[in-house]
Amino acid sequence: MFSYKTYLIFLFVSLGISIGLQIALPFPYGLVAAIGLFIAFPLLLRKQYMNRMRGYGGGRPGSGGKTGGFFGLGSQEGSGGVRYVCLVCNNKHKGGSCPRCGSKMQRADF
């Protein structure tokens, strides 16, 4: 996982590079390059972070690289929709009251 220290290092490196570009390039080109750099570095950090979490383009292991749902978190094969977990006995079931204990206290498990 990326820490604030890593993010600050990337931030100051991009600041140094953008100042160097502004000095080296004429006015409109240096400004455009600096703005592009400030947009590209956070996107690069986010992509690396999401790849590390296996949610951005990597897919789940054994899924053939396919991602499903929001950042690869949903639409698991064979899930059959929303399942519920009973808060009393921790039983997983389809819906309504718990078939094991009859409780209606439940949470959704996606």
Image: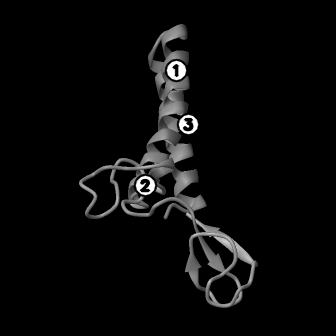
Inter-mark Cα distance, 3 to 2: 29 Å
Residue nearer the viewer, 12 or 75: 75
Inter-mark Cα distance, 3 to 1: 11 Å
Q: Is residue 54 left or right of residue 94?
A: left
Q: Residues within 10 Å of mark 1 (few under 14, many from 20)?
A: some
Q: Amino acid at mark 1?
A: Gln
Q: Amino acid at mark 2?
A: Gly
In the rendered image, residue 42, in percent from the top left (x then y), is placed at 52, 41
* Label 3: which secondary element: helix
Q: Is residue 85 left or right of residue 69?
A: right
Residue at 71% from the left image edge and 88% from the top image edge:
88
Residue at 57% from the left image edge and 76% from the top image edge:
93
In the rendered image, residue 83, in percent from the top left (x then y), is placed at 56, 68
- Pointer 2: what residue? 55
* Tag 2 and tag 1, C-beta contact below 8 Å: no
* Tag 3 and tag 2, C-beta contact below 8 Å: no
